[in-house]
Every structure is written in structure tokens, then in C-alpha cells.
């Protein structure tokens, strides 16, 4: 069936949904397309369900630290019950999203979209023509170039495990691996991490990640740095044998019940047939100008993780880009995308968080900064819960005395980083923080002593 629309949106997560809703509200005819359950990655296969699992792991972690300090034997995770609780959040998403689209008058199409020409998409048996097209297809696991890589379990599949295996090996040491590894370890699994880099979570401050590595090893995780996975085989007893190559070139094989792909993600563009739509793309995703518009096919825009922009692959930034695309489709004056502070967190236990300049970035900019470091583990906020890993590094501009960066590990780091984000955005100085009255005793009130 051939159907024409004012706007075709490929993807139903944060990058596509805002622009679809706003253009529909403006009276445009809109269709949204997805080859997976409607609602996007974050709500169903990413941040939200992960955080539900982290909540249980966090409860076990805190109870373990306080065992013998007022608490008796700590609780244990019942994986089946936890999965059922997680599904109470994820299972309603797709039906609710489709019902909302129907109520709004947005047409929903299930299937893989591919370009036929610059203004037409094929979705199953339907041929959809769009005056404008927005691509918001997100990311997918990066293909790994070694034999047996197809035996790896994805993060999507981990979040649907009915039972947790005894031994789990993670290939990669980024967000997915480290967050899931801490969940699995608190749930009783033995965990091994194979990381090709010299440290885990490279985007974060090295002093923070070094402390997390030590804490993870103290918890019983085996972490192998500067090590590559080079082959995976099935064993006769149903396990997986993962062969690795260390920094000295020697090979070592480790067995596990499950091996999980945590070695990074790439823009999900393979199925789109972009060349037929005259849409350029590179390793970073779909090529766009400052207005998030394809330079080679101006009727096409991209938003979220699939677009090659300076934005980090974070849900809030996908939504912001979707708003910018809507502004540019509906407005008379083009609106350029700007990327300021981008706070991020890794929900390990303890968690990491970062915002603003790193020391390396300050050095690269030849910007003189004052570095304020504090080991927080002996501070009241952490000692009262027996947390043994907590650290803060704050960067202050030497000329203006404004706070320009913050890097944290420890309890409530993801919440504290939001306070630092506000401080940096409003050019606050350490004196401004010290002059502020905070509710006490809270982690927030510690800011006065971190700067």
C-alpha cells in the first residue's frame, strides 16, 4: 500500500517520539515505525530496567556493609522474583505507547524501514512517502571480529534471563559490562571481565575508575586489563570457552556459563539502505549539520544515538535533539544544536559520576585549573553506612575561580553530580557553595567540604 505523510519517524524511543508528538500536535500527518516493541531502548531494554536491578543489588550491598553493625544476615536476591518485578515496569511500555499513538492519531507501523529513494521508505508491504523523514534508530552491539562472537549474549538478553548462571564472563569493560557485573556479583554469580583497554570505563576519571577496579576485585571479580577476547567455543558440557590474549601476547582460556557482549555499541543503520536515500553516514552515525539535518538529503533529519553529533549516547540528550529537530521542522528560523554540560553516571556499586572538564581536557586546552581531591570514605556520610570507597575530584578554574569539573565515586554520586552540574552551569565558585545552607546531614551538605 502506498501512503503519503508529512512526517515519517523511524524509531519510537526518546530521539523520535518528541518530534513525532510535536509535529502531530501541529496538525501534520505522522507515522512512526519500529521493528521492535514500541517505546525504545531506555524504557524497555536499557536504563530503566537496569536501574530496577541495580536497586535490588544496592539493597544487598548496603545490608552487607552493615552486617554486624546493627543488621543481621544480609538479604539475598531471588532472581526470578527480581525479573518479575522488572517486567512490571517494562511489559506495559509497548502497549501503552501504541495506545497513545492511536489516541493521538499517529499511525504505527511494525517492521524494518529501508529507503527506496530520497523520500520513500519500504516497511513490509507498505510503501510510505514522507515530506520529511526523521531517523532515530539508536544503537546496537558492535560486531566483534573473532570466531564464536555469535555465542555472546547481548545486554537485551541479559535483562530477560529467567535464571542467573553461576559463572558469567563479560567481554568489554564499559557501562554495560561493569553495571551488569555488579548486579550479577551481588546476586551470587562469579564474574570475570575481559577489557582490552588499560582501565575500565575509560570516559571516567582514572582516579575514580582505579578505585572502582580495586573495589570490584575486593568483591571477588576477576578483571583482566589490556586483554583481548580472540575466540569463543562451546565445550562438551555446554559451557563457553573464551580464549584471550594478554598484554604479553600469551593466550589463556576461561570457561563460563554465559559470555556477555559489553564491548561497545554502534549506530543502528545497517538495515536502512541509506545510500538509496542519498543519506551519508560514517562510523559515528548519520552525518548531520548543526541543525541535525542530512547535508545530502535535506528532507532527512537524525536525532539521538544514531546521529553523528558531539552528544553522548544519553537518553536526555536524545530527547533534546528530538526537540531541536521539531523546532527546525515547525519553525521559520533554523535552530542549531548546542552541546554544553553532559553529566553522566555509571550505576556500579559504588557508582561513578562525572561532569565538565577532566584533567586531561584542561591540559589539552592549556587551561590552568586547581584540583581539589578528597578521600571521602572516612566522612560521616559514608562511615555511617560502612561504605569503604568514596572519592571526589573537583576542578576549579585558576583565573575565574569557577568550578569547571567534578568526578565522583561513592554513594549518591549520581545525585551529587546534578548539584555540580548546576554549579558549573551557573559559574559558581567554591565560596558560593560554602555560603549555601544545605539540609544536614545529607550527602548534598558534603559539597561545602569537597570544594
Image: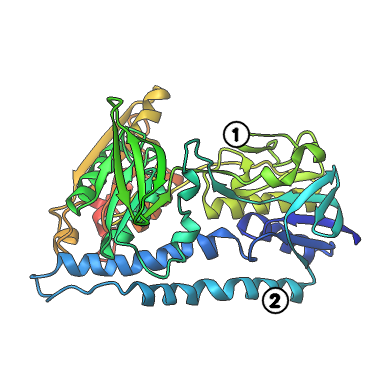
Q: Quadrant of the image for the C terminus?
A: top left
Determine the secondary structure under disc 2: helix
Q: How far apart are marks 2 and 1 (CA)?
A: 35 Å
Q: For this view, does 8 lie left or right of residue 311?
A: right
Which one is nearer the viewer's eye here, 235 or 27?
Answer: 235
Q: Which residue lies furthest to the front in this view?
A: 236
Total numbered labels: 2
Residue 445 placement (x, y as % from top left) = 26, 59
Q: In which quarter of the image is residue 7?
A: bottom right
Determine the secondary structure under disc 1: loop
Report the disc number at residue 26.
Answer: none
Which one is nearer the viewer's eye here, 420 or 238?
Answer: 238
In this figure, which residue is indicated by the disc labeled 1? 283
Residue 273 placement (x, y as % from top left) = 75, 42
Q: Quadrant of residue 231?
A: top left
**Mark 1 packing: few (<14 Cα in 10 Å), some, or many (20+)?**
few
In this figure, which residue is indicated by the disc labeled 2? 99
Which one is nearer the viewer's eye here, 416 or 261?
Answer: 261
**Mark 2 packing: few (<14 Cα in 10 Å), some, or many (20+)?**
some
Q: Residue at x 48, y 77 (%)?
A: 88
Amino acid at each position: 500500500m502506498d501512503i503519503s505523510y508529512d512526517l515519517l519517524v523511524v524509531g519510537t524511543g526518546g530521539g523520535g517520539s518528541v518530534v513525532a508528538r510535536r509535529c502531530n500536535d501541529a496538525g501534520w500527518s505522522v507515522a512512526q515505525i519500529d521493528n521492535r516493541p514500541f517505546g525504545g531502548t531506555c524504557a524497555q531494554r536499557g536504563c530503566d530496567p537496569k536501574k530496577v536491578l541495580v536497586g535490588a543489588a544496592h539493597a544487598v550491598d548496603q545490608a552487607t556493609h552493615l552486617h554486624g553493625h546493627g543488621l543481621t544476615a544480609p538479604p539475598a536476591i531471588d532472581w526470578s522474583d527480581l525479573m518479575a518485578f522488572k517486567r512490571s515496569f517494562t511489559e506495559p511500555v509497548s502497549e501503552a505507547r501504541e495506545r497513545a499513538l492511536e489516541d493521538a492519531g499517529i499511525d504505527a507501523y511494525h517492521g524494518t524501514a529501508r529507503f527506496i529513494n530520497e523520500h520513500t521508505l519500504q516497511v513490509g508491504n507498505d510503501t510510505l512517502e514522507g515530506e520529511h523523514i526523521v531517523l532515530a534508530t539508536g544503537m546496537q552491539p558492535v560486531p566483534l571480529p573473532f570466531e564464536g562472537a555469535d555465542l555472546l549474549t547481548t545486554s537485551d538478553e541479559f535483562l530477560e534471563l529467567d535464571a542467573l548462571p553461576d559463572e558469567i564472563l563479560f567481554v568489554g569493560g564499559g557501562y554495560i559490562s561493569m553495571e551488569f557485573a555488579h548486579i550479577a556479583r551481588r546476586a551470587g554469580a562469579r564474574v570475570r571481565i575481559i577489557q582490552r583497554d588499560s582501565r575500565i570505563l575509560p570516559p571516567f576519571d582514572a582516579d575514580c575508575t582505579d578505585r572502582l577496579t580495586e573495589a570490584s576485585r575486593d568483591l571477588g571479580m576477576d578483571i583482566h586489563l589490556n586483554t583481548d577476547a580472540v575466540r569463543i567455543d562451546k565445550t562438551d558440557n555446554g559451557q563457553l570457552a573464551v580464549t584471550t590474549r594478554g598484554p604479553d601476547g600469551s593466550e589463556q582460556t576461561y570457561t563460563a556459563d554465559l559470555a556477555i557482549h559489553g564491548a561497545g555499541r554502534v549506530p543502528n543503520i545497517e538495515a536502512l539502505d541509506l545510500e538509496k536515500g542519498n543519506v551519508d553516514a560514517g562510523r559515528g552515525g548519520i552525518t548531520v549539520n548543526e541543525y541535525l539535518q542530512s547535508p545530502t538529503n535535506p528532507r532527512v533529519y537524525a536525532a539521538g544515538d544514531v546521529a553523528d553529533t558531539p552528544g553522548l549516547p544519553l537518553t536526555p540528550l536524545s530527547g533534546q535533539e528530538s526537540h531541536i529537530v521539531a523546532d527546525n521542522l515547525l519553525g521559520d528560523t533554523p535552530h542549531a544544536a548546542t552541546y554544553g554540560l553532559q553529566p553522566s553516571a555509571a550505576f556500579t556499586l559504588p557508582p561513578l559520576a562525572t561532569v565538565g572538564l577532566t584533567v586531561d581536557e584542561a591540559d589539552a586546552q592549556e587551561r590552568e585549573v586547581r584540583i581539589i581531591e578528597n578521600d571521602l570514605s572516612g566522612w560521616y556520610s559514608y562511615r555511617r553506612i560502612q561504605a569503604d570507597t568514596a572519592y571526589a575530584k573537583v576542578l576549579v578554574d585558576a583565573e575565574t575561580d569557577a568550578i569547571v569539573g567534578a568526578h565522583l565515586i561513592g554513594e549518591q554520586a549520581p545525585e551529587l553530580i546534578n548539584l555540580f552540574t548546576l554549579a558549573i552551569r551557573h559559574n559558581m565558585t567554591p565560596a558560593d557553595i560554602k555560603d549555601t545552607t544545605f539540609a544536614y546531614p545529607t550527602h548534598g551538605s558534603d559539597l561545602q567540604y569537597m570544594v
